[in-house]
Amino acid sequence: MCEMSEEYRESAPKGSPPPRLGTRDQKCVKCKEGLPVVVIRAGDAFCRDCFKALYVHKFRAMLGKNRLIFPGEKVLLAWSGGPSSSSMVWQVLEGLSRDSAKRLRFVPGVIYVDEGATCGQSPEDRAKTLAEVKLVLQTTGFPWHIVALEEVFSLPPSVLRCSAQEPVGTESAYKAAVDSFLQQQHALGADGVERQSQHCAQDPHSPAGPPTTAQTQAMSRLFDSVETLTAKEELLQTLRTHLILHVARNHGYSKVMTGDSCTRLAIKLMTSLALGRGAFLAWDTGFSDERHGDVVVVRPMREHTLKEVAFYNRLFAVPSVCTPALDTKAPEKASIHRLMETFILRLQAQFPSTVSTVYRTSEKLVKAPRDGCVAGPRCLLCMCTLDVDTADSATAFGAQTSHLPQMQPPVTQAGVAAEPCCCAGMGGGPGCYRGEDPRAQVMEQLCYGCRVNMKDLPSLELLPPYILSEAQIRSQRATAEQEVQEYLLGDSEDEARTGES
């Protein structure tokens, strides 16, 4: 047996170790000529020009490989002011310039969501941040929209309904669209294209006025009532998505670009698994997210790591706006999001292939329901299909569902006048659920992950009205369909009557 006291290593050779090549002695791994200024990975040193070419190529290749954005299509860029989304906006800005080798052919717009109410920012701080945001947006020349998160309290219930999805274009359809666009541009000429782009840039939508005091107070009460930081971050992401979706539909945008980087998607994948959203990983982390139907969310920055984004923004002076978030100065164990972020980043520091390994795993996920499942009801918050077996009480979701009270029509006692229907004018009446517990009404329409998060919200009445209204409308519709089904003849009864005749 080996003894720990034994020494098997040979004595180190005398003399100084071989000299390491200094930075001036190294050359760019791509062009072999320029001096490297960036080291992305161990041994991958790039000069300034080669690093920019690599960075731009990743962005263009991600859009060109998927071919989801057709020429002339309106695309809304979701800009948060952070490094990744700022770099995304700059990539689009450079791709639309006349000096670009292969110009992008879609029509962009930018949206910024002011989330200061969730962090307890004062009106003065929010006004100062918005001034910086407007200054950056004006330099882009794109149409821009500045909306406050408090506007979710005035959204219609229709924002939670999946609109009819357009058929996915084939490769031949994409090529035909490109040829038609090029012919149109050629007919307009250079001057016509320039005037068209200037008209697009000089027609920004005026930002909406500041939110009312009542809306700000309602938003503060909502987030103050949430018990955990994990549920707060999930609720903020949900409300932000609903607001961006509403703005995109109102202004005719069919695509929404987000600046999720490779590192952020790897963290999001692990976080979603911990939150019970494993069934929706392909939508939450994939390149495209078609859950909303008429508006598709795309993530063109998913090949870039946070390190690459930071280097690019630093080298090429990409402007950004630093704003506080819910998890600012929070300890690493304050939420599942912070814990997973710390875990992934520390692991990445020791094993440089951690992020890429997790990211490549997400690419293999398929957007397909389970065998035997058809398109059914969707979650009230995340709008994903409820791909769960509610009848199987052996699962965690089934065990929770079995304890929820079943929807039953209210029974009117004799001699007691019925209360007026809350849905007068909308076809309501006998199936109205005015006296039903609103919490049970909402919880039964949530997926497992959203249901776990809503447990940390003591009162669902603080949610924006459009969520509660849509929950009530869906419950009434389900009960009406159930009542109609009682008067319909089944297939077996039809066959029996046909045999008797």
Image (tube, grey):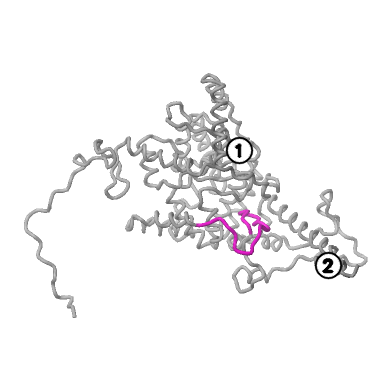
Q: Quadrant of the C terminus?
A: bottom right
Residue sitting at x 67%, y 70%: 391
Q: Please, what is the three-letter code of the amino acid marked with disc 2?
A: Glu
Between 161 and 57, the residue placed more toward the observer is 57
Pointer 1 with pointer 2, Cβ within 8 A? no
Quick one: SS at disc 1?
loop
Total numbered labels: 2
Q: Residue at x 6, y 58 (%)?
A: 14
Task: Examine the residues drawn in magenta and state their main secondary structure.
Answer: loop
Quadrant where the image shows the N terminus:
bottom left
Mark 1 or mark 2: which comes first in sequence?
Answer: 1
Q: Which span is picked out in magenta?
A: 365-385
Q: Is residue 191 left or right of residue 464?
A: left
Q: Which is nearer the eye, 456 or 440? A: 440
Which numbered tag is attached to residue 253? 1
At which x and y percent is residue 113? 56, 42
Which residue position is annotated with label 2?
495
State the separation of the CA atoms marked 1 and 2: 50 Å
